[in-house]
Amino acid sequence: MQKEIFTITTINLTEGVVLLDDIDFKEYRDRCVGYYFDLETAKKCVSEDWGALNEAGYYSHLVIERLPEGLYPGCRYEEKQTEWWYYRDYEKNEWISCLKPKSVLGVISFGMG
């Protein structure tokens, strides 16, 4: 059985509080803040916002990525879902599931570089 981890990477794709999927972002920052060995725990971490993941408004999005053991792990899967995206809803004060923003459609391996 292949070993894998689920990284959680916070990402700032905005220059303010604009949280739409179709914006051309001028700024991009990310930070892998942790990983878990199962998807359920990673999703619970996000839904319960362990550690205040948006860091007082600094990060607008986050992604959970499935990564197998090995070199260049983001290129390994072809048929499995590998990313779960969220944006920060500041009115509800929670992370909301969303589509991958268009500005990063060609990018993979946020958590491992």
Image (cartoon, rainbow, N blue to C red):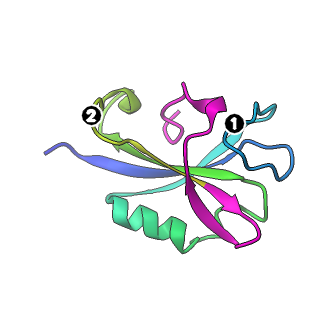
> Is 8 inside the magenta-drawn segment?
no
Residue 79 circle label: 2
- Residue nearest the viewer, comparing 4 with 96: 96
Q: Residue furthest left?
A: 1
Type of amino acid at the residue the image marks with label 2:
Glu
The answer to whether residue 88 is seen in the rendering is: yes
Vertical comparison of 56 with 9: above or below: below
Find numbered disc 1 in the image and state the secondary structure of the residue it sits on: loop
17 displayed left or right of 107: right
Image x and y of residue 35, in percent: 44, 55
Task: Judge the density around disc 2: few (<14), some (14-19), many (≥20) Cα neighbours within 10 Å.
Answer: few
Type of amino acid at the residue the image marks with label 1:
Asp
Residue topped by disc 1: 22
Which residue sits at x=54%, y=24%?
106
90 displayed left or right of 10: right
Alpha carbon separation for disc pair 2 and 1? 25 Å
Image x and y of residue 38, in percent: 32, 60
Stretch in magenta: 87-113
Front: mark 2 or 1: 1
Compare marks 2 and 1 and give the one earlier in the sequence.
1
Q: Quadrant of residue 97?
A: bottom right
Which residue sits at x=48%, y=34%?
109
Image x and y of residue 17, in percent: 83, 53
Residue 30 circle label: none
Which residue sits at x=74%, y=50%?
19
> Is 101 inside the magenta-drawn segment?
yes
